[in-house]
Amino acid sequence: MIIAIDGPSASGKSTTAKGVAKFFGILHLDTGAMYRAITLEYLKYLDISYDSQDFIDLVKEIEINFNRDNQITLNGLCVEQDIRKQDVTSKVSEVSSISIVRKKMVEKQREIARNIDCVIEGRDIGSVVFPNAEFKFYLDAKAEIRAARRLKELTNQDKSVTLDDLITQIKRRDFLDTNRKISPLIRTKEATIIDTSSMSVDEQIEQIVKIINNK
Ligand code: DC
């Protein structure tokens, strides 16, 4: 069983997907973390262009996995904290729009979820990665509310960022994620839309669990 949860950044996907996976005792796969990990690696080599052989090699050689605690690893090292930092967040929409990056990540996502039950969250799960997923959800919320959620999550290092900065950043990422040529963020017609603007995490999890159990 594949449960696909798509939606824009900070719409509540991660916490909800985690909760739903825990309820059913199945794997939670955070595909955004994978795009963040490859961006973290790219930040070390900002002088290489996306169409260069060096970039192709970087993508080819990179090893992105999840450890036993379901934390993301980059070339064998846990990068769960580093991938949430502002420099990664500012660059990730750009890196994730590159076709060789998407090809590699989608292959890996299909490999991880092959033959197992899994809650997978991202932007293109119900549309591209698992178009035949048994359950598809699309979570959304107003940009201002999503930015306020992000502000709460910021680490001490990122405390100089204001709510207005985050609203601007979220709207920019929404634009890039929705308008890119390959696998843009879209609501598939089969997806159940959940507006999380005034919902608690528990309510979001409950609503999804209820829909699944009713089928
Ligand atoms: O869910 P998130 O904010 O951690 O995702 C980070 C970025 O990764 C997001 O701006 C777009 C990209 N992404 C993507 O292109 N496709 C996915 N399936 C998941 C994330």
Image: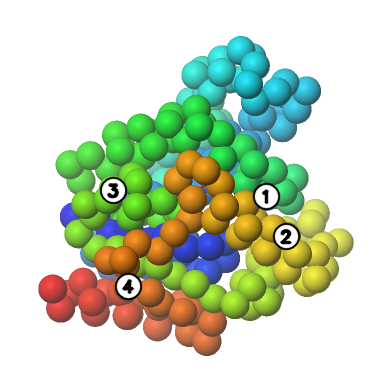
Q: Hey, what amino acid is under mark 2?
A: Gln
Ligand 1 neighbours mark 1 (CB distance < 8 Å): yes
The residue type indicated by label 3 comes to Phe
Q: Earlier in the sequence, mark 3 or mark 1?
A: 1
How far apart are the alpha carbons under marks 2 and 1? 9 Å
Number of other residues with Cα within 10 Å of mark 2, as a class: few under 14, some 14 to 19, many 20 or more: some
- Residue under circle 4? 192
Q: Quadrant of residue 44?
A: top right
**C-alpha span from label 2 to label 4:** 26 Å
| Kind of residue sitting beneath label 1 | Thr
Q: Quadrant of residue 149?
A: bottom right
Is residue 30 visible from the viewing direction of this image? no
In the image shown, does 86 or 175 lie closer to the viewer?
175
- N-terminal of the pair, mark 2 or mark 1, is 1
Q: Mark 2 and mark 1 in contact? Answer it, CB < 8 Å.
A: yes
* Residue 126 point in image, percent of width and height: 33, 55
Relative horizontal placement of residue 102, taking residue 136 as reference (left or right): right
Q: Quadrant of the N terminus?
A: bottom left
SS state under label 4: strand
Where is mark 2, residue-wise? 169
Which is closer to the viewer, label 3 or label 1?
A: 3
- Tell me the element at label 3: loop
Cα distance, mark 3 to mark 2? 28 Å
Q: Which mark is residue 130?
A: 3
Q: Residues within 10 Å of mark 1 (few under 14, many from 20)?
A: some
Q: Secondary structure at mark 2?
A: helix
Look at the numbered discs 3 and 1 and tell me whether their residues touch, using CB distance below 8 Å: no
Q: Is mark 2 within 8 Å of ligand 1?
A: no
Of all residues, the one furthest to the right in this rendering is: 160
Label 1 belongs to which residue?
A: 89
Q: Place residue 151 in its image quadrant.
A: bottom right
